[in-house]
Amino acid sequence: MEKFQAKSSNFRQIIKESFEKQTFLSLIGAKLTKVSPGEIEIEVEDNKKLYQQDGFFHAGVTSTLADVSMGYAALSLASDNSRVLTTEFKINLLSPAVGDKLIARSKVVKFGKILKICKSSVFSKSKEEKLCAISTGTMIISLGDN
Amino acid sequence: MEKFQAKSSNFRQIIKESFEKQTFLSLIGAKLTKVSPGEIEIEVEDNKKLYQQDGFFHAGVTSTLADVSMGYAALSLASDNSRVLTTEFKINLLSPAVGDKLIARSKVVKFGKILKICKSSVFSKSKEEKLCAISTGTMIISLGDN
Amino acid sequence: MEKFQAKSSNFRQIIKESFEKQTFLSLIGAKLTKVSPGEIEIEVEDNKKLYQQDGFFHAGVTSTLADVSMGYAALSLASDNSRVLTTEFKINLLSPAVGDKLIARSKVVKFGKILKICKSSVFSKSKEEKLCAISTGTMIISLGDN
Amino acid sequence: MEKFQAKSSNFRQIIKESFEKQTFLSLIGAKLTKVSPGEIEIEVEDNKKLYQQDGFFHAGVTSTLADVSMGYAALSLASDNSRVLTTEFKINLLSPAVGDKLIARSKVVKFGKILKICKSSVFSKSKEEKLCAISTGTMIISLGDN
């Protein structure tokens, strides 16, 4: 895995502020638990409002964590005033997402000029962590106006 | 596109009841707006709690609609007492999901013995509909105990 | 589905020449059978050199047809002197690819400023056509030097 | 990453024989260079017959290596008389595949009862290795008759 360096000295603050603007992340109770150059961790605690029909975390929640953490992994390597958008991702759901919390850990695999390819692993955790999903995605960074 | 027939005479009721058990769908305000053999439509109304950082519907919401509608498209063709699980899906986000509502329309492409492959188109709608995402996914149907 | 218009009056010739430069397409015997704005069809005839272990067309052949036809679907809408590259694709293999020929039909779904999202259906054909794979992919067009 | 054990004492021989039955792998000159429980490596040497229009290894070749190595990674953990089929894979192409050889390394991520989820990294190599593609896929194992 490539070792990345941040271009912006503010990347942690930029990501924190962007994260807080995402009302949907607040709705599901997502927390940003790690921000490093090219690496992001996000988690949500168990909550009965986040379930599918069998009482597991909904695949939509799992997907959201994977997507958001891959996006910010890409943004962590961008220059100031950048914006990030997901263009595509695929997720394989490996085992039921059930436990005290759900944790997504994402990394940049390739920080290309135009496209940033990332990967994510999502774990359910009670006593131990269990891998419940893997994802790969493509992010695009553009210079924002604001 | 293949023309499908339902195996269960109860499939509409089964899907409606399963949908209502998904607390996450209630949290985001998703509504089941069409159930036909092999075809499902789900929508959510615009709601400031469902946004990403730029004020668009979050990709996690778009993904949830695609995922759920593909799952029920598969379940609509299954026998009674079946359960559906998503094993994987990929989504390409084509344009910002912004509008009065977000509508996912999904169809079964192949109802195999083990795997059910589905596709979904997600539209944002204000006056007109605009295609904002396409997805393909694999569902698995198992016989449930309850 | 959006209706597209070609920007280049030469797109058929451009694609034909690019196709002929692909030595791998010659190796597998692929033929360009339809070129329209935003739509491409490619096929290969049955050939014992293209099999996997059970005597079906290899998934690598199916994938090649999907990939190439999506790429040229994108290129058919680009300006002269453009080059096309695939950045990602996903393929679901629905049924064994066995028959007299394999035909891929691809269309542009969204011709964005940077990214061109396409979809492909691959059919095996003996007397009748049978859908054996669906794919979605992202192409990128850049202005070439030559 | 989970540590896997082979169920069959013959898995190396089974995979070698299956590999040799794949005429398409012979056509592209693919070689099986490593077989371990849950891990496979395959490579092809540079060959002008395997190119796309710019003189790189064709994405169809890269995809074939990823697909085949993921399939055999799954098969390496199966019982005797098993057959493997790819149901879906996605590949992100990160950089031009150009060099003296192309090497795919794949691992099983989850060996489920029905589905086996694998991942692959494909490297181009001249003096050094360079990651040129990542892939994830779903394989299905069935008991064969022969």
Image (cartoon, coloured by chain):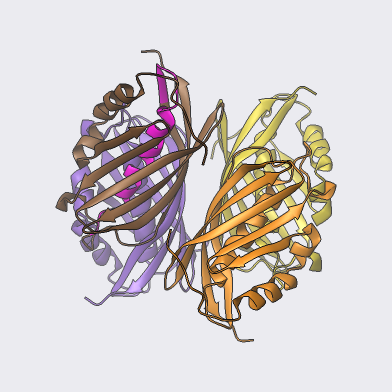
Chain colours: A orange, B yellow, C purple, D brown
The spot of residue A125 in percent (x, y) is: 70, 44
Q: Hey, which quadrant is residue B129 in on the image?
A: bottom right
The spot of residue D126 in percent (x, y) is: 21, 57
The spot of residue C76 in percent (x, y) is: 35, 65
* Magenta residues (range): D56-83
* Residue B94 seen in the current view: no
Q: Is residue A51 magenta?
A: no
Q: Residue furthest left?
A: D48
Q: Is residue B55 above or below residue C86?
A: below
Horizontal relation, residue D1 to residue A49: left or right: left
Horizontal relation, residue C86 to residue A25: left or right: left
The spot of residue D68 in percent (x, y) is: 35, 37
Q: Is residue D123 above or below residue D82?
A: below
Q: Main secondary structure of the magenta part?
A: helix
Q: For the C terminus of chain A, which image quadrant?
A: bottom right
Q: For the N terminus of chain A, which image quadrant?
A: bottom left
Q: Nearer the viewer, residue B49 or B94?
A: B49
Q: Hey, which quadrant is residue A131 in on the image?
A: top right
Q: Is residue B109 above or below residue A41?
A: above
